[in-house]
Protein backbone atom coordinates (compact mmCIF):
# COMPACT_ATOMS: atom_id res chain seq x y z
CA UNK A 1 0.00 0.00 0.00
CA UNK A 2 1.32 3.44 -0.84
CA UNK A 3 1.44 6.17 1.77
CA UNK A 4 -1.11 8.08 -0.30
CA UNK A 5 -3.57 5.19 -0.01
CA UNK A 6 -2.79 4.91 3.67
CA UNK A 7 -3.45 8.63 4.19
CA UNK A 8 -6.75 8.19 2.33
CA UNK A 9 -7.85 5.55 4.79
CA UNK A 10 -6.86 7.65 7.80
CA UNK A 11 -8.51 10.78 6.46
CA UNK A 12 -11.05 9.83 3.82
CA UNK A 13 -13.14 11.99 1.49
CA UNK A 14 -10.90 15.02 1.36
CA UNK A 15 -12.13 17.14 -1.54
CA UNK A 16 -8.98 18.99 -2.46
CA UNK A 17 -5.26 18.43 -2.26
CA UNK A 18 -3.06 20.78 -0.30
CA UNK A 19 -1.58 21.99 -3.60
CA UNK A 20 -5.03 23.03 -4.73
CA UNK A 21 -5.54 24.92 -1.50
CA UNK A 22 -2.20 26.66 -1.92
CA UNK A 23 -3.41 27.89 -5.31
CA UNK A 24 -6.78 28.97 -4.02
CA UNK A 25 -5.18 31.33 -1.51
CA UNK A 26 -2.35 33.08 -3.31
CA UNK A 27 0.06 35.56 -1.75
CA UNK A 28 -1.58 38.91 -1.23
CA UNK A 29 -0.63 41.76 -3.45
CA UNK A 30 0.14 44.46 -0.92
CA UNK A 31 2.64 47.21 -0.65
CA UNK A 32 5.96 46.63 1.09
CA UNK A 33 5.63 46.64 4.86
CA UNK A 34 1.86 46.13 4.91
CA UNK A 35 0.85 44.07 7.92
CA UNK A 36 -1.77 41.36 7.47
CA UNK A 37 -3.04 40.28 10.83
CA UNK A 38 -6.10 39.05 12.56
CA UNK A 39 -8.17 38.83 15.68
CA UNK A 40 -9.08 35.23 16.32
CA UNK A 41 -11.49 34.82 19.23
CA UNK A 42 -13.55 31.86 20.29
CA UNK A 43 -17.21 32.78 19.91
CA UNK A 44 -18.04 32.92 23.60
CA UNK A 45 -19.42 36.43 23.27
CA UNK A 46 -17.15 37.49 26.09
CA UNK A 47 -14.40 39.99 25.38
CA UNK A 48 -11.71 40.16 28.00
CA UNK A 49 -10.13 43.60 28.43
CA UNK A 50 -6.82 41.94 27.48
CA UNK A 51 -8.35 40.67 24.24
CA UNK A 52 -9.68 44.13 23.50
CA UNK A 53 -6.16 45.44 24.06
CA UNK A 54 -4.66 42.84 21.72
CA UNK A 55 -7.24 43.41 18.99
CA UNK A 56 -6.82 47.15 19.32
CA UNK A 57 -3.08 46.82 18.72
CA UNK A 58 -3.52 44.34 15.87
CA UNK A 59 -6.08 46.56 14.16
CA UNK A 60 -3.90 49.63 14.51
CA UNK A 61 -0.77 47.91 13.15
CA UNK A 62 -2.66 46.74 10.09
CA UNK A 63 -4.31 50.09 9.50
CA UNK A 64 -1.23 52.23 9.85
CA UNK A 65 0.62 50.08 7.29
CA UNK A 66 -2.32 49.94 4.85
CA UNK A 67 -2.50 46.25 5.57
CA UNK A 68 -5.40 43.92 6.26
CA UNK A 69 -7.10 43.16 9.53
CA UNK A 70 -9.45 40.19 9.54
CA UNK A 71 -11.71 38.40 11.95
CA UNK A 72 -11.36 34.65 12.22
CA UNK A 73 -13.62 32.68 14.47
CA UNK A 74 -11.92 29.87 16.34
CA UNK A 75 -14.82 27.64 17.21
CA UNK A 76 -13.10 24.27 17.34
CA UNK A 77 -13.90 24.06 21.02
CA UNK A 78 -17.66 23.70 20.61
CA UNK A 79 -18.31 23.67 24.33
CA UNK A 80 -17.32 27.30 24.59
CA UNK A 81 -19.41 28.64 21.72
CA UNK A 82 -22.61 30.50 22.44
CA UNK A 83 -25.40 31.35 20.04
CA UNK A 84 -24.91 34.79 18.66
CA UNK A 85 -21.48 35.03 20.30
CA UNK A 86 -19.96 36.16 17.02
CA UNK A 87 -22.42 39.01 16.49
CA UNK A 88 -21.86 40.14 20.03
CA UNK A 89 -18.11 40.21 19.51
CA UNK A 90 -18.48 42.18 16.27
CA UNK A 91 -20.89 44.66 17.86
CA UNK A 92 -18.78 45.11 20.98
CA UNK A 93 -15.59 45.70 19.04
CA UNK A 94 -17.30 48.14 16.69
CA UNK A 95 -18.15 50.27 19.72
CA UNK A 96 -14.41 50.63 20.21
CA UNK A 97 -13.93 51.49 16.59
CA UNK A 98 -12.31 48.15 15.95
CA UNK A 99 -13.44 47.17 12.49
CA UNK A 100 -12.32 44.47 10.14
CA UNK A 101 -11.39 44.66 6.50
CA UNK A 102 -12.09 41.02 5.99
CA UNK A 103 -13.38 37.85 7.59
CA UNK A 104 -16.54 36.98 9.43
CA UNK A 105 -19.17 39.72 9.38
CA UNK A 106 -22.73 39.92 10.70
CA UNK A 107 -24.06 39.00 7.30
CA UNK A 108 -21.77 36.40 5.86
CA UNK A 109 -18.12 36.57 5.03
CA UNK A 110 -16.03 39.17 3.33
CA UNK A 111 -12.76 38.39 1.59
CA UNK A 112 -11.10 35.80 -0.60
CA UNK A 113 -9.27 33.85 2.07
CA UNK A 114 -12.21 32.17 3.79
CA UNK A 115 -13.96 30.33 5.17
CA UNK A 116 -12.96 32.38 8.18
CA UNK A 117 -14.70 30.13 10.69
CA UNK A 118 -12.60 27.17 11.71
CA UNK A 119 -15.47 24.71 11.92
CA UNK A 120 -15.99 25.25 8.18
CA UNK A 121 -12.38 24.46 7.31
CA UNK A 122 -12.21 20.77 8.11
CA UNK A 123 -11.39 19.75 4.55
CA UNK A 124 -8.50 22.18 4.46
CA UNK A 125 -7.00 20.90 7.72
CA UNK A 126 -7.35 17.34 6.56
CA UNK A 127 -5.69 18.06 3.22
CA UNK A 128 -2.60 19.29 5.03
CA UNK A 129 -2.71 16.53 7.64
CA UNK A 130 -2.70 14.09 4.72
CA UNK A 131 0.38 15.77 3.30
CA UNK A 132 2.16 15.24 6.61
CA UNK A 133 1.08 11.60 6.81
CA UNK A 134 2.23 10.94 3.25
CA UNK A 135 5.60 12.49 4.09
CA UNK A 136 5.78 10.42 7.29
CA UNK A 137 5.70 13.59 9.41
CA UNK A 138 2.47 12.66 11.17
CA UNK A 139 0.94 9.43 12.37
CA UNK A 140 -2.19 8.04 13.97
CA UNK A 141 -2.08 7.49 17.71
CA UNK A 142 -4.37 5.04 19.47
CA UNK A 143 -3.36 5.69 23.07
CA UNK A 144 -6.21 6.20 25.49
CA UNK A 145 -6.40 8.91 28.15
CA UNK A 146 -5.70 6.26 30.80
CA UNK A 147 -2.59 5.05 29.03
CA UNK A 148 -1.32 8.60 28.75
CA UNK A 149 -2.02 9.18 32.43
CA UNK A 150 -0.08 6.06 33.31
CA UNK A 151 2.81 7.27 31.23
CA UNK A 152 2.69 10.65 32.89
CA UNK A 153 2.87 9.11 36.37
CA UNK A 154 5.74 6.89 35.34
CA UNK A 155 7.64 9.87 33.96
CA UNK A 156 7.08 11.72 37.21
CA UNK A 157 8.30 8.84 39.30
CA UNK A 158 11.42 8.59 37.14
CA UNK A 159 11.83 12.37 37.35
CA UNK A 160 11.64 12.62 33.57
CA UNK A 161 10.05 15.34 31.53
CA UNK A 162 6.37 14.52 31.07
CA UNK A 163 4.69 14.33 27.68
CA UNK A 164 4.37 12.32 24.52
CA UNK A 165 7.82 12.40 23.01
CA UNK A 166 10.76 10.21 21.96
CA UNK A 167 10.67 6.79 23.53
CA UNK A 168 7.47 7.69 25.38
CA UNK A 169 5.62 8.16 22.10
CA UNK A 170 4.28 4.65 21.94
CA UNK A 171 2.46 4.87 18.60
CA UNK A 172 5.27 6.68 16.83
CA UNK A 173 6.87 3.56 15.48
CA UNK A 174 3.83 1.48 14.67
CA UNK A 175 3.98 0.22 11.10
CA UNK A 176 1.28 1.08 8.57
CA UNK A 177 0.05 -2.51 8.82
CA UNK A 178 -0.20 -2.37 12.61
CA UNK A 179 -2.13 0.85 12.39
CA UNK A 180 -4.47 -0.48 9.71
CA UNK A 181 -5.20 -3.50 11.83
CA UNK A 182 -6.17 -1.31 14.77
CA UNK A 183 -8.34 0.82 12.53
CA UNK A 184 -10.05 -2.29 11.18
CA UNK A 185 -10.71 -3.29 14.76
CA UNK A 186 -12.56 -0.02 15.20
CA UNK A 187 -9.98 1.61 17.47
CA UNK A 188 -10.25 5.39 17.79
CA UNK A 189 -7.26 7.49 16.78
CA UNK A 190 -5.93 10.98 16.75
CA UNK A 191 -3.25 12.37 14.45
CA UNK A 192 0.04 13.44 15.99
CA UNK A 193 3.02 15.25 14.55
CA UNK A 194 6.13 13.07 14.25
CA UNK A 195 8.40 15.64 15.80
CA UNK A 196 11.86 16.02 14.31
CA UNK A 197 13.04 18.28 17.11
CA UNK A 198 15.64 17.74 19.79
CA UNK A 199 14.79 19.20 23.18
CA UNK A 200 18.46 19.62 24.00
CA UNK A 201 19.04 21.86 21.03
CA UNK A 202 18.14 25.51 20.99
CA UNK A 203 17.16 27.85 18.23
CA UNK A 204 17.04 31.62 18.04
CA UNK A 205 13.67 33.22 17.81
CA UNK A 206 12.90 36.88 17.36
CA UNK A 207 9.59 38.21 18.55
CA UNK A 208 8.62 41.68 17.31
CA UNK A 209 7.93 42.77 20.88
CA UNK A 210 9.97 40.54 23.14
CA UNK A 211 13.05 40.57 20.94
CA UNK A 212 15.49 37.70 20.54
CA UNK A 213 15.62 34.62 22.69
CA UNK A 214 16.91 31.09 22.63
CA UNK A 215 14.23 28.46 22.85
CA UNK A 216 14.49 24.67 23.06
CA UNK A 217 13.33 22.73 20.03
CA UNK A 218 10.09 20.88 20.40
CA UNK A 219 10.33 17.12 20.58
CA UNK A 220 6.77 16.44 21.60
CA UNK A 221 4.56 14.57 19.17
CA UNK A 222 1.73 16.96 19.84
CA UNK A 223 -1.78 16.42 18.56
CA UNK A 224 -2.79 17.87 15.20
CA UNK A 225 -6.26 16.38 14.82
CA UNK A 226 -8.43 15.16 17.65
CA UNK A 227 -10.38 11.91 17.39
CA UNK A 228 -13.38 13.76 15.95
CA UNK A 229 -11.11 15.12 13.22
CA UNK A 230 -11.15 18.65 14.64
CA UNK A 231 -7.76 20.36 14.69
CA UNK A 232 -5.98 21.58 17.79
CA UNK A 233 -5.16 25.27 18.12
CA UNK A 234 -1.56 24.58 17.03
CA UNK A 235 -2.47 22.92 13.78
CA UNK A 236 -5.31 25.28 12.89
CA UNK A 237 -3.07 28.26 13.64
CA UNK A 238 -0.38 27.09 11.22
CA UNK A 239 -2.77 26.20 8.41
CA UNK A 240 -5.01 29.25 8.79
CA UNK A 241 -2.32 31.86 9.18
CA UNK A 242 -0.39 30.38 6.28
CA UNK A 243 -3.33 30.20 3.89
CA UNK A 244 -4.81 33.50 4.98
CA UNK A 245 -1.38 34.96 4.29
CA UNK A 246 -1.01 36.50 7.71
CA UNK A 247 2.27 38.40 7.90
CA UNK A 248 2.17 39.05 11.66
CA UNK A 249 0.61 36.86 14.30
CA UNK A 250 -0.31 39.38 16.98
CA UNK A 251 -1.69 37.50 19.93
CA UNK A 252 -1.70 37.11 23.69
CA UNK A 253 1.49 36.32 25.51
CA UNK A 254 0.07 33.03 26.79
CA UNK A 255 0.93 31.51 23.40
CA UNK A 256 4.60 32.43 23.59
CA UNK A 257 5.52 29.11 25.17
CA UNK A 258 4.03 27.32 22.16
CA UNK A 259 6.46 29.00 19.79
CA UNK A 260 8.76 25.95 19.48
CA UNK A 261 5.76 23.90 18.36
CA UNK A 262 4.54 26.53 15.95
CA UNK A 263 7.88 27.25 14.31
CA UNK A 264 8.45 23.54 13.88
CA UNK A 265 5.00 23.04 12.42
CA UNK A 266 5.47 25.79 9.85
CA UNK A 267 8.79 24.28 8.87
CA UNK A 268 7.54 20.72 8.64
CA UNK A 269 4.61 21.87 6.55
CA UNK A 270 6.98 23.74 4.26
CA UNK A 271 5.43 27.12 5.09
CA UNK A 272 7.20 30.41 5.47
CA UNK A 273 6.91 31.38 9.14
CA UNK A 274 5.06 34.58 9.87
CA UNK A 275 6.37 37.21 12.24
CA UNK A 276 5.11 36.97 15.79
CA UNK A 277 4.24 39.73 18.24
CA UNK A 278 3.21 38.54 21.68
CA UNK A 279 1.28 41.13 23.64
CA UNK A 280 2.04 41.07 27.33
CA UNK A 281 -0.88 40.49 29.66
CA UNK A 282 -2.67 43.18 31.62
CA UNK A 283 -1.88 42.87 35.29
CA UNK A 284 -3.38 44.09 38.50
CA UNK A 285 -2.17 44.43 42.04
CA UNK A 286 -3.69 41.88 44.37
CA UNK A 287 -2.57 41.82 48.00
CA UNK A 288 0.83 43.15 47.11
CA UNK A 289 1.26 40.69 44.25
CA UNK A 290 0.93 41.32 40.57
CA UNK A 291 -1.20 38.94 38.61
CA UNK A 292 -3.07 38.74 35.34
CA UNK A 293 -6.54 40.25 35.29
CA UNK A 294 -8.69 37.18 35.40
CA UNK A 295 -12.06 36.53 33.86
CA UNK A 296 -13.02 34.42 36.84
CA UNK A 297 -11.91 36.71 39.66
CA UNK A 298 -12.12 40.26 38.35
CA UNK A 299 -15.27 42.01 37.18
CA UNK A 300 -13.06 44.52 35.34
CA UNK A 301 -11.92 41.75 32.99
CA UNK A 302 -15.18 42.04 31.05
CA UNK A 303 -15.70 45.03 28.83
CA UNK A 304 -19.34 45.08 29.91
CA UNK A 305 -17.99 46.32 33.26
CA UNK A 306 -16.80 49.58 31.68
CA UNK A 307 -19.97 49.91 29.73
CA UNK A 308 -22.04 49.64 32.84
CA UNK A 309 -19.82 52.10 34.62
CA UNK A 310 -20.26 54.45 31.70
CA UNK A 311 -16.63 55.05 30.84
CA UNK A 312 -16.71 56.29 27.26
CA UNK A 313 -15.29 53.79 24.80
CA UNK A 314 -13.06 56.49 23.36
CA UNK A 315 -11.51 57.07 26.77
CA UNK A 316 -10.83 53.36 27.11
CA UNK A 317 -9.13 53.40 23.71
CA UNK A 318 -6.99 56.34 24.77
CA UNK A 319 -5.97 54.48 27.88
CA UNK A 320 -5.16 51.31 25.95
CA UNK A 321 -3.07 53.43 23.61
CA UNK A 322 -1.05 54.76 26.54
CA UNK A 323 -0.49 51.18 27.67
CA UNK A 324 0.55 50.09 24.18
CA UNK A 325 3.14 52.80 23.62
CA UNK A 326 4.13 54.89 26.60
CA UNK A 327 5.10 57.84 24.40
CA UNK A 328 1.49 58.11 23.25
CA UNK A 329 0.47 60.10 26.33
CA UNK A 330 3.02 62.82 25.74
CA UNK A 331 2.13 62.91 22.07
CA UNK A 332 -1.53 63.31 22.94
CA UNK A 333 -0.71 66.23 25.24
CA UNK A 334 1.22 67.91 22.47
CA UNK A 335 -1.27 67.18 19.73
CA UNK A 336 -4.63 67.96 21.24
CA UNK A 337 -6.27 68.47 17.86
CA UNK A 338 -5.18 65.08 16.52
CA UNK A 339 -6.66 61.68 17.14
CA UNK A 340 -5.58 58.11 17.67
CA UNK A 341 -5.29 57.42 13.95
CA UNK A 342 -2.60 60.05 13.61
CA UNK A 343 -0.26 58.27 15.99
CA UNK A 344 2.10 55.56 14.77
CA UNK A 345 2.48 52.62 17.12
CA UNK A 346 5.67 50.63 17.26
CA UNK A 347 6.13 47.06 18.42
CA UNK A 348 9.50 47.86 19.87
CA UNK A 349 7.93 50.30 22.31
CA UNK A 350 5.52 47.73 23.70
CA UNK A 351 5.99 46.18 27.08
CA UNK A 352 7.81 42.87 27.12
CA UNK A 353 6.71 41.76 30.55
CA UNK A 354 3.32 42.42 32.05
CA UNK A 355 1.48 45.70 31.72
CA UNK A 356 -0.07 47.18 34.85
CA UNK A 357 -3.68 48.08 34.27
CA UNK A 358 -4.22 51.16 36.40
CA UNK A 359 -7.91 51.69 36.92
CA UNK A 360 -7.43 55.09 38.56
CA UNK A 361 -5.48 56.27 35.59
CA UNK A 362 -8.22 55.08 33.27
CA UNK A 363 -10.74 57.06 35.32
CA UNK A 364 -8.51 60.09 35.12
CA UNK A 365 -8.23 59.83 31.36
CA UNK A 366 -11.97 59.39 31.17
CA UNK A 367 -12.50 62.50 33.28
CA UNK A 368 -10.23 64.55 31.05
CA UNK A 369 -11.82 63.17 27.95
CA UNK A 370 -15.35 63.97 29.13
CA UNK A 371 -14.30 67.45 30.24
CA UNK A 372 -13.34 68.25 26.66
CA UNK A 373 -16.65 67.16 25.17
CA UNK A 374 -19.31 69.62 24.17
CA UNK A 375 -22.34 69.86 26.43
CA UNK A 376 -24.52 68.28 23.76
CA UNK A 377 -22.09 65.35 23.46
CA UNK A 378 -22.14 64.84 27.21
CA UNK A 379 -25.91 64.92 27.02
CA UNK A 380 -25.98 62.28 24.27
CA UNK A 381 -23.65 59.94 26.12
CA UNK A 382 -25.43 60.45 29.43
CA UNK A 383 -28.75 59.67 27.76
CA UNK A 384 -27.38 56.61 25.99
CA UNK A 385 -26.12 55.25 29.30
CA UNK A 386 -29.28 56.14 31.23
CA UNK A 387 -31.49 54.49 28.63
CA UNK A 388 -29.89 51.17 29.54
CA UNK A 389 -29.14 51.56 33.22
CA UNK A 390 -31.52 54.20 34.64
CA UNK A 391 -34.73 54.54 32.66
CA UNK A 392 -36.27 57.20 34.92
CA UNK A 393 -33.27 59.41 34.60
CA UNK A 394 -33.31 58.87 30.84
CA UNK A 395 -36.91 60.12 30.71
CA UNK A 396 -35.96 63.14 32.74
CA UNK A 397 -33.08 63.92 30.40
CA UNK A 398 -35.29 63.49 27.36
CA UNK A 399 -38.13 65.64 28.59
CA UNK A 400 -35.72 68.37 29.65
CA UNK A 401 -33.27 68.20 26.79
CA UNK A 402 -32.35 71.89 26.42
CA UNK A 403 -32.28 72.44 30.15
CA UNK A 404 -30.03 69.39 30.61
CA UNK A 405 -27.60 70.53 27.94
CA UNK A 406 -27.41 73.88 29.71
CA UNK A 407 -26.61 72.10 32.97
CA UNK A 408 -23.81 70.16 31.29
CA UNK A 409 -22.59 73.38 29.84
CA UNK A 410 -21.84 74.96 33.21
CA UNK A 411 -18.08 75.58 33.26
CA UNK A 412 -17.65 73.60 30.04
CA UNK A 413 -16.57 74.55 26.54
CA UNK A 414 -13.91 76.83 27.94
CA UNK A 415 -10.15 76.72 28.28
CA UNK A 416 -10.09 75.02 31.63
CA UNK A 417 -13.32 73.05 31.72
CA UNK A 418 -14.71 71.60 34.89
CA UNK A 419 -13.70 67.99 35.43
CA UNK A 420 -16.53 66.57 37.45
CA UNK A 421 -17.82 63.64 35.41
CA UNK A 422 -15.49 60.66 35.27
CA UNK A 423 -18.04 58.16 33.97
CA UNK A 424 -21.66 58.29 33.05
CA UNK A 425 -23.07 56.17 35.86
CA UNK A 426 -22.04 59.09 38.06
CA UNK A 427 -23.82 61.81 36.10
CA UNK A 428 -27.04 61.73 38.09
CA UNK A 429 -24.97 62.13 41.23
CA UNK A 430 -23.45 65.26 39.77
CA UNK A 431 -26.60 66.98 38.59
CA UNK A 432 -29.59 65.63 40.54
CA UNK A 433 -30.16 68.84 42.48
CA UNK A 434 -30.80 70.73 39.26
CA UNK A 435 -34.02 68.79 38.64
CA UNK A 436 -37.10 69.53 40.74
CA UNK A 437 -38.12 65.89 40.33
CA UNK A 438 -34.93 64.73 42.02
CA UNK A 439 -34.39 67.53 44.48
CA UNK A 440 -35.04 65.87 47.81
CA UNK A 441 -32.20 66.91 50.07
CA UNK A 442 -31.31 64.56 52.87
CA UNK A 443 -30.02 67.43 55.00
CA UNK A 444 -28.66 70.95 54.81
CA UNK A 445 -25.17 71.43 56.09
CA UNK A 446 -24.97 75.19 56.60
CA UNK A 447 -21.35 75.13 57.69
CA UNK A 448 -20.14 78.28 59.55
CA UNK A 449 -23.42 80.05 60.13
CA UNK A 450 -25.66 77.90 62.23
CA UNK A 451 -28.14 80.35 63.75
CA UNK A 452 -31.49 79.78 62.08
CA UNK A 453 -32.56 83.41 62.38
CA UNK A 454 -29.36 84.58 60.77
CA UNK A 455 -29.80 82.13 57.93
CA UNK A 456 -33.35 83.32 57.41
CA UNK A 457 -32.21 86.93 57.44
CA UNK A 458 -29.52 86.30 54.85
CA UNK A 459 -31.79 84.37 52.52
CA UNK A 460 -34.72 86.77 52.77
CA UNK A 461 -32.60 89.87 52.38
CA UNK A 462 -30.88 88.39 49.43
CA UNK A 463 -33.94 87.29 47.59
CA UNK A 464 -36.10 90.31 48.37
CA UNK A 465 -33.56 93.08 48.03
CA UNK A 466 -30.60 91.93 45.97
CA UNK A 467 -31.07 89.02 43.62
CA UNK A 468 -32.08 89.80 40.08
CA UNK A 469 -31.96 86.95 37.58
CA UNK A 470 -31.10 89.36 34.78
CA UNK A 471 -27.91 90.61 36.39
CA UNK A 472 -24.66 89.81 34.69
CA UNK A 473 -22.06 87.90 36.66
CA UNK A 474 -20.11 90.91 37.86
CA UNK A 475 -23.23 92.70 39.08
CA UNK A 476 -24.39 89.51 40.75
CA UNK A 477 -21.11 89.26 42.56
CA UNK A 478 -20.99 92.94 43.50
CA UNK A 479 -24.45 92.72 44.98
CA UNK A 480 -23.57 89.71 47.06
CA UNK A 481 -20.62 91.64 48.42
CA UNK A 482 -22.73 94.66 49.11
CA UNK A 483 -25.22 92.60 51.02
CA UNK A 484 -22.50 90.85 52.98
CA UNK A 485 -21.16 94.19 54.15
CA UNK A 486 -24.61 95.50 55.00
CA UNK A 487 -25.24 92.48 57.21
CA UNK A 488 -21.90 92.81 59.00
CA UNK A 489 -19.79 90.35 57.02
CA UNK A 490 -16.47 91.10 55.38
CA UNK A 491 -16.81 91.73 51.64
CA UNK A 492 -13.48 90.13 50.90
CA UNK A 493 -11.22 87.57 52.48
CA UNK A 494 -8.27 89.87 52.96
CA UNK A 495 -10.19 92.30 55.12
CA UNK A 496 -11.68 89.44 57.05
CA UNK A 497 -8.33 87.81 57.76
CA UNK A 498 -6.87 91.08 58.99
CA UNK A 499 -9.64 91.74 61.48
CA UNK A 500 -11.79 88.69 61.92
CA UNK A 501 -13.29 90.03 65.15
CA UNK A 502 -14.79 92.99 63.36
CA UNK A 503 -17.13 90.78 61.36
CA UNK A 504 -19.80 88.14 61.80
CA UNK A 505 -18.08 86.22 59.01
CA UNK A 506 -17.23 86.82 55.42
CA UNK A 507 -18.68 86.77 51.95
CA UNK A 508 -17.86 83.08 51.51
CA UNK A 509 -20.13 82.28 54.46
CA UNK A 510 -22.92 84.24 52.80
CA UNK A 511 -22.58 82.53 49.46
CA UNK A 512 -22.40 79.18 51.24
CA UNK A 513 -25.80 79.82 52.80
CA UNK A 514 -27.26 80.58 49.39
CA UNK A 515 -25.57 77.58 47.83
CA UNK A 516 -26.77 75.22 50.54
CA UNK A 517 -30.32 76.59 50.46
CA UNK A 518 -30.54 76.10 46.71
CA UNK A 519 -28.74 72.79 46.30
CA UNK A 520 -28.25 71.42 49.84
CA UNK A 521 -24.61 70.93 48.83
CA UNK A 522 -21.45 72.61 50.06
CA UNK A 523 -19.72 72.25 46.75
CA UNK A 524 -21.25 72.86 43.35
CA UNK A 525 -20.25 74.32 40.03
CA UNK A 526 -20.69 78.03 39.47
CA UNK A 527 -23.53 79.30 41.66
CA UNK A 528 -24.37 82.19 39.35
CA UNK A 529 -24.99 79.74 36.48
CA UNK A 530 -26.95 77.40 38.68
CA UNK A 531 -29.28 80.19 39.79
CA UNK A 532 -29.83 81.36 36.25
CA UNK A 533 -30.85 77.88 35.23
CA UNK A 534 -33.05 77.22 38.23
CA UNK A 535 -35.07 80.37 37.60
CA UNK A 536 -36.79 82.70 40.02
CA UNK A 537 -39.71 80.49 40.82
CA UNK A 538 -37.59 77.52 41.81
CA UNK A 539 -35.14 79.67 43.71
CA UNK A 540 -37.97 80.98 45.85
CA UNK A 541 -39.44 77.54 46.31
CA UNK A 542 -36.11 76.12 47.38
CA UNK A 543 -35.39 78.91 49.84
CA UNK A 544 -38.75 78.34 51.44
CA UNK A 545 -38.10 74.62 51.62
CA UNK A 546 -34.66 75.18 53.15
CA UNK A 547 -36.04 77.48 55.80
CA UNK A 548 -38.64 74.92 56.76
CA UNK A 549 -36.12 72.11 57.01
N1 LIG B 1 -8.38 31.61 19.68
C1 LIG B 1 -7.13 31.96 20.27
C2 LIG B 1 -7.40 32.64 21.58
O1 LIG B 1 -8.51 33.10 21.78
C3 LIG B 1 -6.41 32.90 19.34
C4 LIG B 1 -5.00 33.12 19.60
C5 LIG B 1 -4.39 33.74 18.36
O2 LIG B 1 -4.60 34.92 18.14
O3 LIG B 1 -3.76 33.02 17.61
O4 LIG B 1 -6.55 32.71 22.43
Image (cartoon, rainbow, N blue to C red):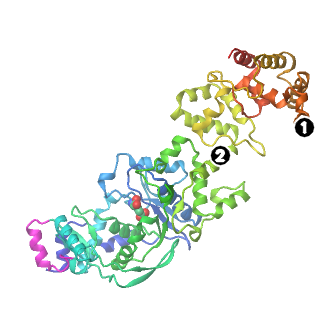
Q: Is residue 417 above or below residue 153?
A: above
Residue 515: x %, y % from top left: 75, 27
Q: Is residue 112 visible?
A: no
Mark 2 and mark 1 residues within 8 Å of each other at the beta carbon: no
Which corner quadrant of the image does residue 421 belong to?
A: top right
Foreground residue, 503 or 294? Answer: 503
**Residue 22, x across and y down, in percent:** 36, 72
Magenta stretch, residue numbers: 169-187
Residue 388 drawn above or below residue 419? above
Badge 2 is on which residue? 367
- Determine whether the residue tagged by mark 1 lies in a helix, strand or loop: helix
Picture residue at 55% right of the left edge, 33% below the top = 386
* Residue 57, picture quadrant: bottom right
Foreground residue among 407 and 360: 360
Query: Within 10 angstroms of label 1, few (less than 14), some, or many (20 or more) residues?
Result: few
On-image quarter of the C terminus: top right
**Is residue 439 inside the magenta stretch?**
no
Asked if residue 134 is positioned above or below residue 329 in the image, the reply reads below
Identify the residue at image location x=73%, y=26%.
446
**Mark drawn on residue 494:** 1
Q: How many marks?
A: 2
**Which residue is depicted at the point 35% across and 75% down?**
265
Residue 183 within the magenta-colored segment of the rendering:
yes
Image quarter for ligand 1 equals bottom left
Numbered disc 2: secondary structure: helix
Q: Quadrant of residue 4?
A: bottom left
Residue found at the far bottom of this picture:
201
Describe residue 95's horizontal placement relative to residue 203 as left or right: right
Q: Which quarter of the rendered picture does the N terminus lie within?
A: bottom left
Residue 454: x %, y % from top left: 80, 19
Amino acid sequence: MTREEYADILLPDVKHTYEEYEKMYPERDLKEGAIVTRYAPSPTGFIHIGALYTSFIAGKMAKQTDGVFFLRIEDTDQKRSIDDGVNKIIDDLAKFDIKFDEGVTKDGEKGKYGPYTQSERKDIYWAFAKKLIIEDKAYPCFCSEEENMKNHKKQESLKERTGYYGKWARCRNLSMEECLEKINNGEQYIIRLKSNGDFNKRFTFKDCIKGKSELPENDEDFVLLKSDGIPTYHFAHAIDDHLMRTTHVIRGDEWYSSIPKHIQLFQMLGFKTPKYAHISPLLKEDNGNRRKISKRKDPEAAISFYHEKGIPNKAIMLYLATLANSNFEMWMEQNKDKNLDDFTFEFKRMSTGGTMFDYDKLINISKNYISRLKASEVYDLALEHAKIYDKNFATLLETNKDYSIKIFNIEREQKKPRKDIAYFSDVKNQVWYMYEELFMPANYNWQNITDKNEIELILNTYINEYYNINDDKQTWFDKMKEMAEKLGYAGNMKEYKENPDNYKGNIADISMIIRVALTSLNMTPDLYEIMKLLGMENIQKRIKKALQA
